[in-house]
Structures are given as structure tokens and as C-alpha cells.
Image (cartoon, rainbow, N blue to C red):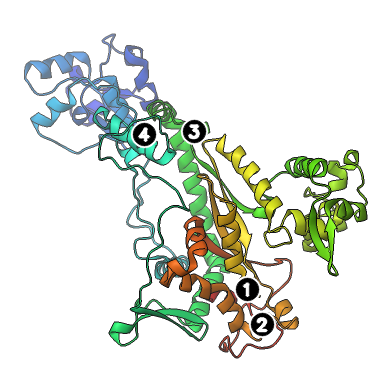
Amino acid sequence: VGSSCVDQAKHRQLNPAHVCRRVWVSCRAMGAKAGKARTRSTPVEVIAEEECHHDKHWKTVTVQSRENVEQKNNAGMGRKASWAQIISMEDGSDRKSGGSHAKKEDSAKPAELDDGSAYIQVRIPEPEVVKYGIEAANAAKRILKCLEIRKKYVGENVGQHVEPNTVRYGDKAAHKKERAQLVAQFDGDSGLALEQGARRILWEPFSGTPPSVDNSLEVRFQNGVFQVCDRNADGAPVAGGAEIDVDEFCADYVEVLRTMRDRGCISFCGPRLKELDLKFQLHTHRNAEREAQRQKQACGRDWYQVRKVDTHIHHSACFTQRQLMAFIRKKMSTEMDTVVAEEGGKPLTLREVFSTAGVSDLDEVNADRLCCMASIGSGQHDTFGRFDVFNTKYNPFGDKRLRDIFLKTDNYIGGRYLAELTKEVMAAYQTQKFVCAEWRISIYGKKAEEWAKLAKWFRQYSIQCQQIRWLIQVPRLYPLFRKLGQVQNFADMLRHIFEPLFMASLDPAAHEDLHFMLQQVVGIDSVDDESQGTQMTLSSYPTPEEWDSETNPPYTYWMYH
């Protein structure tokens, strides 16, 4: 309590009998104990915010004594406020200037505990007089330009917030049943009966009949780009204006790259990111109780019941070393005399392959000899620093033939072993309802039949799982295939990669296997040895038909196509 209130009251020409006591903001929650004044023993009681005098210099709030409050109440000029309202005033959530008598009556109602849906918000207002330098202005312009570039490739609706129904209706009893139905649809929970006419999301990638061919459409390949054209519209592209030329793409890429490396942008974004982090820490500090209360109303959802997706997992590495070792031991116990490979026109059994690899007995199969686990070390033992060492980890017992037998879809036994191992791993995922994965499988682009063979393997062994989706990755191995004579130019490789997808889209009935396989594919990516340097851009870009040398195209050229 300030000791100079009387002097201030005289200075402001106030009645000393109605002296205001100064109460520190941090002492409000102490109740009547904070109202013990030095000059009088009358306890101080908090009133409505409109009747409080804020001292902007001392960051304090002065409130009037109970005697003055009672006089005002008798005159019908003000009402008392609860401590909850004062706390909300401190947080800035109910701060207003002025107001009518009706607003005061609303603020006088007892504050009810919220249901956890409203959070204390922290705002840091910035004075209008603050000015920034030229460097910050240029950095902001470059970042805004990058956002416009992002919209060009992702779409105009990028960045818009869409709140799912399960969150919007989380605190309304009227929508509990609807929320349960939504959860049942996405979880595939057959135990929860839905009303008649309700739609259940069923995922059966190999069911149904492929659509018939659309004869009004045709595909054209020009300058390395496939375009779908409408025969009924004089061959005009269906998606007019969707194509971006390679020069524009590379210019946008260089602009984003320069923005990332610009010192002004780094200085502009660094403090901003730190401020956002501090804001979040303050939010968790102030709203921990509300967060916990909201979480209890989340229909049984917690960290263990929220979907977690494992990404960037290659199909040949989707299992652990222990799972692979157990599968190999099982095959050694039951199928040692099965013909699994052919070498020089001579069929080889699994026993013969293991014998040449130096493994003749089941007891010799252990994790150390299998040698398929990644390791972090120095020099030649570093799996993540040496790409060649990383590739050798895919060879069980150091034998490439065992890799072809157990970890390939296109081999002498038609990828049967890999299909069985894949289904074992999928069965393990099915026991964990809220753990999903995005597996990667390679299309190399050296032959046009790769898609058909892979799709046949998917359908033949019914490779499907509710919790697994697939992503196609294309290794940037054009120089190798050009040297082997499997492609004549870069355009041949692009045809092998993309043309089967357009053919299956135009005539799904003629490409049933690929049509059903594509129901599980969610994207395409490009991979390579990142430790090797590459030229980022060129002054001029030839067409893919003209790129017939054994030199690998730049990274931007790959990314464009």
C-alpha cells in the first residue's frame, strides 16, 4: 500500500475522507489482507474496473475504500466485482474503456468457471511510432515474395486454418454422438453401430470395378512434360495455365534459396522465432490448468490415442534387424531346398546360396553376422556419413544375392519372401491402432515395365493395410542407366517414370493392377547420395530429348520434372 496517497489526493484535489489506497497488482489475489492501510483500518474491497484508477507510471491500480463503495452503491452508481473478474482484467481479456450502466450490471454477475475452451491470451501491442530500418523492410519483402511463390505451387488456399469437427464440437453435448460417429468412421470401429444412412469410410484398395476408358482425352509428351488434352476442344489442355516452364521454376527456386541465406532475413526471422517460442512458454504457464481441463474432455484422446505416422521409411528397411533375422531363421528351417535364384542358367536352392555366403547352420544366424543395423561411427563404419556403407547394410550377411532373394519384389520367386515379411510387419502395425507409417518403394525409370511388375506384386499378394500408405521414390541414377544403354536421353527416363501413370488414369480397365495399386500411393519423391555435390542451376536448360550425355542433370532440373 502506498504511503503517499494522501499527498496525491491533495494534489488531485480529492476529498481526504475518500482517499484511494494504492494496491499493487501482484497483491490483488491476497484478498482483504492486501487492503490494510497505514492511516486507516478500513479494509479495501475491489470494485468494477471502470471505477479503478490506473497509474501507468507505477504499473499499479488504485481502488476505493469500502465506505466510498457503499456510498456509491446507495446512489446506484456502481457495483462490486469478483476477484475472478479482477484477474481477468489483469490478463487483459475483459479490458474495455467506458461503458453504459447495463455493461456494469453484466460485469457484476458472478464469474463462472469456464469449461476449458477459453484461454488467457497474451498480446504485445506495438506502438505506431516504432520504425524499422531498410534491412528489415527488405527482408520482409523477400519473405512475402516467398509466400507468393509458395501459393503458386501449392494453391491459393494454403495457410488457411480448418478446424476439424471433433475439435469444434468438443465441448457441446449435442454433438457427442456425431463426434463418436466421426471417430468410428476414421478408426474403422465396427463395434459402434451407425444410424441408417450414415456413411462409413471403408478402405478397400482392391475392391470395385475400374472405370472405363475416356476416349475424349489424350496425353501428349512435349519438352519433358505430360499434358492431358481434350479432343473435343481441338486438343486444348484440360488444365490450361497449370504448366510452369523450367526457367520460371528455377528462378523461383533460386529466389527461395537466396532468401534462406540472406543475412537480413536471418536477423529478421531469428528474434521473431524466439519471441514465438517465449509466447508459447508463457501460454503453457498461464493456461496449464485450462489445457488439462480441455484434454479431459477430448473423448478419451491422449498421446497414446493420437495417430503417429512414421515417415521416410524405405520398404526394404521397414522391419527391424530382429524381425528380419527371425524370418530368415524360419525360412532356413522350412525351405532350405526351395529354388530361389538362377545363376548362369543354373537354378540355386536356398541352401546353396547360404553355403556360398558362409552360413551353413541355423545357429550361425545372429545379429552380428547379419550386419543390417545402422551404426554411427567414424570413418568407414559411419552409416550416415558414407552412402556406400549405408547401401551395404541392405545385404544380409554381406551377400547381394540374399538381398535380391529376401528384399526385392522382382526376383526368381516373384518377391514371395518380401511379401510374407511385409505382411508380418503389417500385422504388427494392426495391433497398434494409433501407429501408422508411410513406406517408400523405388521406381528407377530404366524400364517402362517397372510399374506393371510392381503393381502385379501388390495385387498378387494383396499388399494392403489400413495404417500403411506408400510413397514412390525415384533415385537420381540417370548417368548409370545412360552408361548401360538402358535409356538414350533424359526424356526416355521421364517416359518410363510417368507415362504408365497417365495411361492407367485414362484407361484404368486396361491397367487394373496399377489402378488398384495407386489407391495406396500418396506421393512421389526423388532421392540420391546427398553427400555428393551437384550443380544447382544452369544459364540455359535444354529439352530432355536433347539431354543425351552421361552427365547427371542439375538438382533443379530433376525437381522441375
Name the residue at 60% across, 82% down. 492
As measured in the structure, the alpha-carbon distance from the residue carrying label 4 to the one carrying label 2 is 78 Å
Q: Are marks 1 and 4 in contact (CB under 8 Å)?
A: no
Does residue 129 appear left or right of residue 249 in this picture? Answer: left
Q: Secondary structure at mark 2?
A: loop
Number of numbered labels in the structure image: 4
Q: Which residue is mark 4?
A: 58
Q: Secondary structure at mark 3?
A: helix
Q: Nearer the viewer, residue 10 or 27?
A: 27
As measured in the structure, the alpha-carbon distance from the residue carrying label 3 to the one carrying label 4 is 49 Å
Marked residue nearer the N-terminal end (3 or 4): 4
Name the residue at 92% across, 56% down. 356
As measured in the structure, the alpha-carbon distance from the residue carrying label 1 to the one carrying label 4 is 72 Å
Q: Nearer the viewer, residue 536 or 489?
A: 489
Q: Are marks 4 and 2 in contact (CB under 8 Å)?
A: no
Q: Amino acid at mark 3?
A: Gln
Q: Are marks 3 and 2 in contact (CB under 8 Å)?
A: no
Q: Which residue is mark 2?
A: 487
Q: Residues within 10 Å of mark 3 (few under 14, many from 20)?
A: few
Marked residue nearer the N-terminal end (3 or 2): 3
Q: Which residue is mark 3?
A: 305
Residue 307: percent from the left, percent from the top? Answer: 50, 40
